[in-house]
Image (cartoon, rainbow, N blue to C red):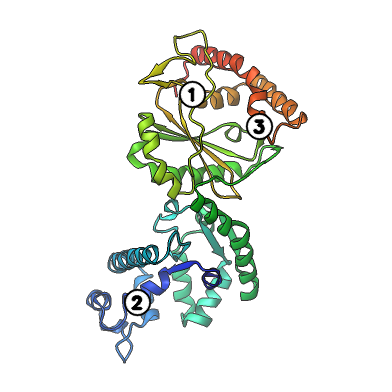
Amino acid sequence: MSATFSEFGAIVVDGDVIAREVVEPGTEGLASLVEAFGESILLPEGALNRPALAAIAFSDEQQRARLNSIVHPLVAHRRSELIANAQEAQENPVIIEDIPLLVESQMAPMFPLVVIVHADIELRVRRLIDYRGFSEKDARSRIAAQASEEQRRAVADVWLDNSGSAEELVARARTLWHERIQPFAHNLQAGRPAHAEPRLVPSDPLWPAQAQRILARLRTVAGHRTSRVDHIGSTAIPGMDAKDVIDIQVTVGSLEVADELAGALLGAGYPRTAITHDVGKPDGRSTVGEFDHVNGESLWGKRLYCSADPARPTNVHVRVDGWPGQQFALLFVDWLTANPQARSDYRAVKRDVAAQGLVNTGAYTEAKEPWLPDAYRWAWEWADATGWRP
């Protein structure tokens, strides 16, 4: 599959190839492996006998950790070199990283798009025996040490079936390139969100898992600069009709920090938009309103970043901790989740707007706006009555 992407001009950084390079004869890596596991892991000509090493390393957790402690740092260093070389040689290259232990190494949130190529266990065992020279016992030991299908699905933005022929996998890879990877890359190079006009649809059971992948990605990118990252909006409310757009809130200490995140968020696949505030909603319970300001910024100020991925529309709202927009985004989800009547009322509002043909236009939010000030007041009354805290 990586070869297919390479044909289209992508720079492929293959973890398996790197892992072989760093333990070739004469390398520091091979010398360290021999010191750790003995000369029985060598072929007569001095090269690494991979099945022999696997028989030792994958039969015992401690031995596997020992192997990883030797090989992983060498692979990471070489990977960084290759990526730096690609970025120096070509402006905005599309870099495809082929990482055999992506899930096990917990690296998935570091990437804007994760593609998992899957085949069932029996087929994987057969391929290790036929093409890699493994015994059946060693093949099963290796697979048992790898991530489960459930763990792999949890990080997969794209799940590619590899149970058929090589030609079938190539065809799937070509489609993926043209329909998703290439448009994604072009949007990022232009610094623009993907164009998406999703329609109002019934609640999708896939939304929570998709949101979890985005949350992990954004927590990794924002790091210490955020105090929390949350799934918000209609897709976070069980059973709620919604546009097929995942809304995420990143909470920061100031709008300056929200601006500082622009480069990191772009690298993660989320260009910045021109939207810098929410519509204020005075609630009658405090002095906080549309015209309250801190250092010249409205307390309803925010920064909005949107996904460049054409297949997963996402809005990333970066708001300041404790400001009314940040608080209401969290409250709104909990209030609607806990109140069936309010949820039904909001669903009716959304369907009415959709019936007017406004769901795909900028008028969609504006058309819902008359209902939201009352909802803001009702939600805070519920919060006061229940002792809700964000």
Earlier along the polypeptide chain: callout 3 or callout 1?
A: 3
* Callout count: 3
> Residue at 31% across / 91% down in the picture?
45
Decide if residue 185 is in sight here.
Answer: yes
Estimate the x, y position of residue 329 in percent, counting from the top left.
Answer: 51, 26
Residue type at numbered disc 1: Gly
Residue type at numbered disc 2: Glu
Decide if residue 165 is in sight here.
Answer: no
> Residue at 61% across / 14% down in the picture?
374
| 72 displayed left or right of 384 | left
**How would you rate the neighbour count of disc 1 (Cα within 10 Å): few for under 14, some for 14-19, many for 20 or more?**
many
Question: What is the C-alpha distance between the residues marked 3 and 1?
Answer: 21 Å
Corner quadrant of residue 205: top right
Question: What is the C-alpha distance between the residues marked 3 and 2?
Answer: 52 Å
Estimate the x, y position of residue 102 in percent, counting from the top left.
Answer: 44, 60
Q: Secondary structure at mark 2?
A: helix
Q: Which residue is mark 2?
A: 21
The residue closer to the viewer here, 21 or 80, is 80
Q: Which residue is mark 3?
A: 240
Earlier along the polypeptide chain: callout 3 or callout 2?
A: 2
Residue type at numbered disc 3: Met
Earlier along the polypeptide chain: callout 2 or callout 1?
A: 2
Estimate the x, y position of residue 228 in percent, counting from the top left.
Answer: 41, 34
Corner quadrant of residue 41: bottom left
Numbered disc in front, either 3 or 2:
2
Q: Which residue is mark 1?
A: 325
Q: Quadrant of the C terminus?
A: top left
